[in-house]
Image: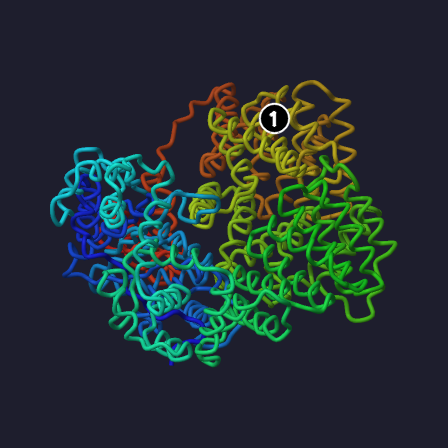
Amino acid sequence: MRCCYAPRVRGIRVSGDGPERLRGRRREYEALEELVSKVEAGRSAVLVLRGDAGIGKSALLESLVARVAGHRVARGAGAESEMELPFAGLHQLCAPFLGRANSLPPPQREALATAFGVSAGPPPDRFLVGLAVLGLLTEVAAEQPLFCLVDDAQWLDRVSAQTLAFVARRILAEPLALVFASREQTGLDDLAGLPELTLNALDDTNARALSDAAAKGPVDERIRERVLAEARGNPLALLELPHDLIEADPADNLPDPGPVTSRIERSYLARVRSLPTATQQLLLTAAAEPIGDVALLRRAAERLDISLAEVGPAVTAGLVDIRNLVRFRHPLLRSAIYRSAGLAELRETHHVLAEVTDPVLDPDRRAWHLARATVRPDEEIAAELESSAARALARGGTAAAAAFLAHAAVLTPSPQYKATRALAAAQAKLRAGAPAAARDLLALARSGALDEFGRARTDLVEAQITFALSHIDEAVPLLLATARRLVTLDAGLARETFLDTLSAAMFAGRLAAGADAREVALVAQQTSPPVTRPPGNVDLLLHALATRFTGDYRDAVAASRDALHAFRRETAPEEILRWSWLASALAAEMWDDEAWTELVTRHVRTARSVGALAELPLALNSRAVVHTCAGELDAAALLIAEITRLQEATGGSFVPYGKMTLAAWQGRAPEAVPLIEAGMEGALESGEGIGVAVARRAEAVLHNGLARYEKAFDAARPASEHPQDLVAANWGLVELVEAAVRSGRLAAAETALTQLTRTTQAAGTNWALGVQARSRALLSQGDAAEELYREAIERLGRTRVAAESARAHLLYGEWLRRENRRNDAREQLREAHALFTRFGANAFAERAVRELRANGETVARRDGPAAVTLTAQETQIAQLARDGLTNSEIGAQLFLSPHTVEWHLRKVYAKLGIASRRLLRTAL
């Protein structure tokens, strides 16, 4: 029994004139030959064939099938009518290999089974499904080169297109090819950015040659010229237009100025309308049900009281082929037949198809037909569509669920149910990444009969849409108003919305046009309903953050410790993924390096383990900042490179906080300055005031490292002037004290130190008191300064923020040299230089070198480790292999196939001059 929604695997529709249609395609043939050679050599290849309908894409796919006859081929095709059925296209491609799914890691195996409706389970993350498909296809390709061909990719359902695009961006070293044939890009295109080849019209010489080769006898020259003029080099048009022009009046030689595709469709329709009425009716029925199931067509014919033999004239005319599957001569023929039918005729056809579709095996396809069989409200059909939406959501097909719900809403007679279903559709559209479409559905929801809670939920979705469209400053007041409205309706949702509002306000920061974080926190404290149960993560985090923005910092520290203590014990992945960013930011704000490191590390680990690739780049970004503060700049660079690869695969983007911070500490101004400026522009465009603060603080670190203290001061002051910029403001104060002292602005340094002390003294951690002591030492003299420097070194030495400890050694060494204590200075400066060199913090290392040379010391430059010859990904893989992970385990962590991991390791061995992974520990 096949799963309840999955399409039967269809054959690719190919006309018998495929070879003729490939005339003049030397460039395309060469591209395909290069692709085949690459795969046969054990490498992966991806190609998107682009072009208008009839330009020859399908024929090229057929020529590729013939070329790789000795290898394994998997095929699929999009269908316009299946775009609302989740994973329909993907199932076509993977169906022959599902027996191998047991070899996948359990989370991936379960995600794939749930997506295809084979088993029940929680809705899978689409990227986890993508990893499963990646593993499945590469496993098959390991035995024999595999060529996956997808025709009419522009009609793939959204989640299938996203999944296959993800796989295409992750394959590298497997004998595997993914080849798509798609119309030209229009609007949203998940295949955009993949290697592509655009098929152009044939030149006049090749067009004439094709026309002559296809002619079955003498053709009037005027008709021949008219065909050439109307076809405009389109191979399908050159083959099809003569069928209806051969009967035309030779005197009527004016070419049709309309689009070539429309002209081909009209040619097809002329031939269809010459057939018997019963034949036309069967062709329309087949066109309305594109899976090509002959048994289904036979049942429909019986319901129409027509013999299936009536399709014979269409078969004789070469318009359709009926064997195991129903196949049209070309997709344009099917669409032309369907679009030319009258509305009443279409409704009757879909009604018949719904009646003969098995409600147990294909409930979603039956509901789809029913929806198109009526234009009047019908609660029974609407309920079936709602059930289909629930099944789609359970399989992770959010976009499909939204489409089903939207249809259900339109067909719902009850104004209350209509509004409820439209609201659910809007929520699903938003989760599917289509905020504009979600907003349209909200208008439908508002036109219905919503109760007070429904109207509040509608306002909440409106606010979330506004935030998703990067209008953060507009989203904050909308979220806040909705949170207040929810207080008397749903206390739990109200507190959650207050926390989301506070998070949005924190992002908006200094760019907030309306309520800022403090105002939001005040409203939350004054109106949030009391907690009548043991407080959860939302309650504790909301209380801690609200106290941070409105109350005494000491009270905020106490509340934050309670929240962090509870959240560190959290085990539910959905909770960890939802709130880790806020919790880890709170830990950093409270100068708690242990909790900060633990929470960020767990965030990354959880995102990896559940395959949450949409969340992983954000988690890696935070982890990169942790690594940077720990002086592990190489590790941070590896994560930044991984973020880039993931964003290429998933299509996501955000302000690169981690990348800016890393660049600042690396201290290479020609690279860092443009990056920080771009990050600043991105933050301003998206309304992220916190991003402006992070960029300014990164700029201050860069210039302090380069000893450009005037520039550092100019950057540190705006970085720290908004106390509501969580974390960034505190860190900006640290930079401001040093830059102000070094540039002679002692009053500004004193003011900054006072502000810094308010938070560090209350936090009371070694990190907080260490940077406080170091900053205070800069403004102190004699024994007091020395005691403070020693305290800073001692305290920071106990923390995980080794970069700050190294700066304490540097500042202490600089102070000792100015005190003419050359030997003592040498010791501290050597330690600073050694640390910064090991970290890769070049500017600070050079600053230490200058001080050492001024102290009379000759500093030898150190050669970098062998690992610098490796790329970021090679280094990451080599380190994991060194630590004992297998290729499969490495692939699971980095979302690569084991074969790609092995390919990278072979390159690592060659670069390091070793023969196996057991020597990696020494080589690295």
User: Is residue 913 at all visible to an observer of this figure?
Assistant: no
Quarter of image, res 417: bottom right
Element type where label 1 sits in the image: helix
In front here: 123 or 456? 456
Q: In the rendered view, does 882 fall on the left or right side of 755?
A: left
Q: How many dots with numbers?
A: 1
Where residue 676 sits in the image (x, y, percent)?
55, 30
Quarter of image, res 245: top left
In front here: 562 or 686? 686
- Quarter of the image that includes the N terminus: bottom left
Amino acid bearing label 1: Leu
Where residue 461 sits in the image (x, y, percent)?
69, 55
Q: Is residue 685 above or below residue 324?
A: above
Q: In the rendered view, does 520 fall on the left or right side of 83?
A: right
In front here: 911 or 522? 522
Where residue 568 sits in the image (x, y, percent)?
64, 62
Residue at 71 percent across and 69 percent down: it is 414
Quarter of image, res 104: bottom left
Where residue 101 sits in the image (x, y, percent)?
35, 71
Q: In the rendered view, does 692 fall on the left or right side of 496?
A: left
Around disc 1, counting alpha carbons within 10 Å, would you say few (fewer than 14), some (14 to 19), or many (20 or more)? Answer: many
Q: How is the image coloured?
A: rainbow
Q: In the rendered view, does 567 fall on the left or right side of 22?
A: right
Q: Is residue 914 above or below residue 10?
A: above
Q: Is residue 134 above or below residue 323?
A: above
Residue at 59 percent across and 31 percent down: it is 681
User: Is residue 757 at all visible to an observer of this figure?
Assistant: yes
Residue bearing the label numbered 1: 816
Residue at the extreme right: 526
